[in-house]
Image (spheres, helix red, strand yellow):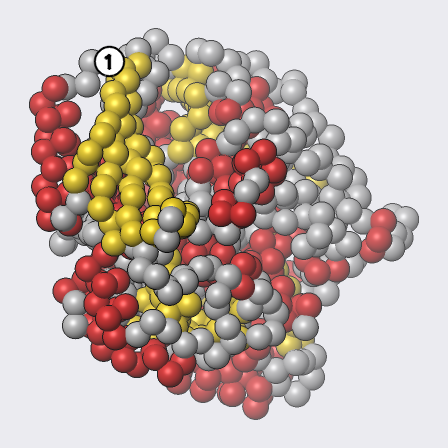
């Protein structure tokens, strides 16, 4: 497949890995932020190709994993109301809330539908004026423009039966929180290429400066990730900390300005709870006041519903790169993709699920 | 913060209780396997059922009769490359064929939803007739039920098939042995992607057509050149991965695949990239996998490629002794990864 096969070429990948090995003289801890990148590393076994000195730890960039428990509980609560059609990205249906998940809510009679795009939810709202359609709008800066567009369209059309249950998170404040933590081990970041396609890479300059940490914006194919690792190792070995862009075929410095514009028009920055991590100041998005009529939290008066995150769940440590999924006593035994105990085992982008699906033989052996 | 040992750290989110049937129980993945193991097998236990093949083979006065049944709930009813009628004929013929049986007769039971257009029903039945005639089988009995509007999805069809297995031929998912080769009759994922594209209104430069086809003549050509086939499967729901995981588990062997030789059409690859799906888990309706003795593999491959439905056949891997039950794959980068069976349906990723 053109524009994909080139980035999965064995010869190129092996040459890059060899170059990484040649330049690595001591141990480094690198974090890829995005769950899609974790997925590629596991699926292609990139860790097998890299020198032992390099430790790749997996970041919090799995939207399903970091969506707070109470958002899932709210979605399940809404789905169980007979007048509501709850529309969601497919991955969210299996995520356990406090007591149930959306698949079970559906089995119990809830009208829960899977959509590939939030605009499908708008279509459903148009087609069912007698029902209240709620879209579960979650994700990072990647899904935010499309979600914003859905709210914008609904407002423009006066679709009063369309609302969104919003749980949006932002990458740069998460990196800031990780770096500021006393327990941080990460020495270099692969920034998420899709997020930066939307937002550009300018936002990451301040992080590089404030924490003196190299950041390379990376793509999602094996060659992309190996190249990003090489760029990070080269900087680290030379004692440098710069912002670099490996994913130039998609990411520009400014990013996608029209997408940012619609985001800004619809959303405002807010404090945000991350599942497994906790509250991070100014790390999320919520609907602006003008969109209150499309904000499920306000329409259904859900704001009061809260769920206590289990304080000692290891997924917190996994999402911050402090522990590997295999450090968990339940991994692969009590916690598997068909019986997930925590969110990182649910989504294919979750670190635990990626380890389980692709690497447990290496772990066992 | 108090320091905890790893044993103390565990995710305390409660397990979802399995007191309701979920959609995933019908996905052909691990949940389906659990349902069979925990509900159906204990209640209905008998030696033939326990073999868990796609068809049951029973001996009646020396005649080896193969029986199989399958229900079809595909939506939309009509899709590029076929419809629910032809699919219901092909699917049941294939379940017989991969057991080495010559398919002879089918039954057809219709569950129709009140309000279904008579024209659609007629088109489906005509299509069944054409598919059956082409395959040389007859629909010899049937049943019709109508459910209230809203209680069905237009039309569900169940077909049951009867065929005859030649004496001496023993194909079974527990027969794979270390050293055997894994053969695949052509590109994977066509059916699942054709359905998904139609359902989601996705358009590609070329229309992806379902591979729905009756495989019994291909199987006949294969059995003509060798009897050293251990087992065959048609990788429908759950795709190549589920079928191979079942064989690995039942034969207590591992299977190692070679990613670069597994055929996948460019359009299917593209659609999978777009939707965040893995073709290894996407359904097929006109492909088979065969596990064959190493000495017979090349001749078998030639025979498969000589048949119109097997032109793009490949040897995609081999059977190993270590790690029984595990399916692994040498990736295009030369590294190794697991090809797991999915828990439920493959869910499209968010980004």
Residue placed furthest toward the bottom: A22
Residue A280: image location, x then y, percent = 66, 42
Q: Chain of mark 1?
A: B
Q: Which residue does the image show at 35% across and 27% down from the upper left?
A: A121
Residue placed furthest toward the front: B61
Quarter of the figure with the C terminus of chain A = bottom right
The one of A361 and A42 positioned closer to us in this rendering: A361
The one of B333 and A266 positioned closer to us in this rendering: B333
Residue on which the image places disc 1: B114
Query: Is A159 displayed left or right of A31 in the figure?
Result: left
The residue carrying pointer 1 sits among few (fewer than 14), some (14 to 19) or many (20 or more) residues within 10 Å by Cα, namely: some
Q: Is residue B7 something one can see in this rendering?
A: yes
Residue A166: image location, x then y, percent = 50, 30
Residue B73: image location, x then y, percent = 31, 33
Query: Is A175 displayed left or right of B310 in the figure?
Result: right
Mark 1: secondary structure: loop
In the image, residue B16 sits, relative to residue A341, either above or below, namely above
The one of B201 and B61 positioned closer to us in this rendering: B61
Which image quadrant is residue A321 in? bottom right
Quarter of the figure with the N terminus of chain A = bottom left
Residue B51: image location, x then y, percent = 50, 51
Q: Which residue does the image show at 40% across and 61% down from the upper left?
A: B171
In the image, residue B30 sits, relative to residue B20, either above or below, namely below
Q: Is residue B241 something one can see in this rendering?
A: no
Q: Which residue does the image show at 44% across and 71% down from the upper left?
A: B257
Q: Which residue does the image show at 17% across and 45% down from the upper left?
A: B137
Residue placed furthest toward the top: A130
In the image, residue B89 sits, relative to residue A189, either above or below, namely above
Query: Is B349 displayed left or right of A215 in the figure?
Result: left
The one of B40 and A210 positioned closer to us in this rendering: B40
């Amino acid at each position: 497949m053109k524009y994909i096969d080139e980035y999965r070429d064995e010869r190129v990948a092996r040459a890059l890995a060899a170059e990484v090995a040649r330049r690595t003289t001591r141990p480094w801890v690198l974090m890829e932020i995005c769950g899609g990148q974790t997925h590629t590393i596991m699926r292609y076994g990139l860790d097998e190709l890299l020198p032992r000195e390099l430790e790749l730890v997996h970041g919090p960039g799995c939207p399903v994993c970091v969506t707070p428990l109470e958002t899932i509980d709210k979605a399940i609560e809404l789905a169980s109301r007979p007048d509501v059609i709850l529309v969601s990205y497919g991955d969210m249906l299996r995520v356990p809330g406090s007591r149930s998940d959306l698949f079970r809510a559906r089995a119990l009679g809830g009208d829960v539908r899977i959509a590939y795009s939030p605009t499908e939810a708008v279509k459903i709202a148009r087609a069912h004026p007698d029902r209240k359609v709620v879209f579960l709008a979650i994700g990072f800066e990647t899904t935010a423009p499309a979600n914003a567009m859905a709210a914008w369209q609904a407002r423009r059309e006066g679709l009063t039966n369309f609302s969104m249950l919003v749980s949006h998170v932002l990458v740069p404040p998460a990196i800031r929180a990780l770096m500021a933590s006393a327990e941080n081990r990460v020495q270099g970041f692969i920034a998420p290429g899709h997020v930066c396609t939307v937002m550009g890479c300018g936002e990451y300059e301040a992080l590089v400066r404030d924490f003196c940490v190299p950041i390379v914006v990376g793509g999602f194919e094996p060659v992309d990730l190996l190249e990003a690792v090489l760029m990070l190792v080269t900087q680290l070995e030379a004692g440098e900390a710069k912002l670099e862009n490996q994913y130039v075929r998609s990411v520009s410095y400014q990013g996608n300005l029209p997408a940012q514009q619609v985001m800004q028009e619809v959303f405002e920055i807010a404090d945000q709870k991350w599942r497994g991590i906790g509250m991070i100041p100014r790390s999320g998005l919520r609907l602006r006041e003008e969109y209150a009529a499309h904000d499920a939290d306000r329409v259904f008066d859900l704001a009061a519903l809260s769920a206590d995150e289990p304080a000692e769940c290891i997924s917190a440590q996994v999402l911050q790169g402090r522990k590997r999924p295999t450090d968990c006593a339940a991994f692969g035994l009590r916690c598997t993709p068909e019986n997930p105990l925590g969110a990182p085992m649910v989504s294919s982008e979750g670190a635990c699920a990626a380890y389980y699906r692709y690497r447990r033989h290496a772990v066992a052996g | 913060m108090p320091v905890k040992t790893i044993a103390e750290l565990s995710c305390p989110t409660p397990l979802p209780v399995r007191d309701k049937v979920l959609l995933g129980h019908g996905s052909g993945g691990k949940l389906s396997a659990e349902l069979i193991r925990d509900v159906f097998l204990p209640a209905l236990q008998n030696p033939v059922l326990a073999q868990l093949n796609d068809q049951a083979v029973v001996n009646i006065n020396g005649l080896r009769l193969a029986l199989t049944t399958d229900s079809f709930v595909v939506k939309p009813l009509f899709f590029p490359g076929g419809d629910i009628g032809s699919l219901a004929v092909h699917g049941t013929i294939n379940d017989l064929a991969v057991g080495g049986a010559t398919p002879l007769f089918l039954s057809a039971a219709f569950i129709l939803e009140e309000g279904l257009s008579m024209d659609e029903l007629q088109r489906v039945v005509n299509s069944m007739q054409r598919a059956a005639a082409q395959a040389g089988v007859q629909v010899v009995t049937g049943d019709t039920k109508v459910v209230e509007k809203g209680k069905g999805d237009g039309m569900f069809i169940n077909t049951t098939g009867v065929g005859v297995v030649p004496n001496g031929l023993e194909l079974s998912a527990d027969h794979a042995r270390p050293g055997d080769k894994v053969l695949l009759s052509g590109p994977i994922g066509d059916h699942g992607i054709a359905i998904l594209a139609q359902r989601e209104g996705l358009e590609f430069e070329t229309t992806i057509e379902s591979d729905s086809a009756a495989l019994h003549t291909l199987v006949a050509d294969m059995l003509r050149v060798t009897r050293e086939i251990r087992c065959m499967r048609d990788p429908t729901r759950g795709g190549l991965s589920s079928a191979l995981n079942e064989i690995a588990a039942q034969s207590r062997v591992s299977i190692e695949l070679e990613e670069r030789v597994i055929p996948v059409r460019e359009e299917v690859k593209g659609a999978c990239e777009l939707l965040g799906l893995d073709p290894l888990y996407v359904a097929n309706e006109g492909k088979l996998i065969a596990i064959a003795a190493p000495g017979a593999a090349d001749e078998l491959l030639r025979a498969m490629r000589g048949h119109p439905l097997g032109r793009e056949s490949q040897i995609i891997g081999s059977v190993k002794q270590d790690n029984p039950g595990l399916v692994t794959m040498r990736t295009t980068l030369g590294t190794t990864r697991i090809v797991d069976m999915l828990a439920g349906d493959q869910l499209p990723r968010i980004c």
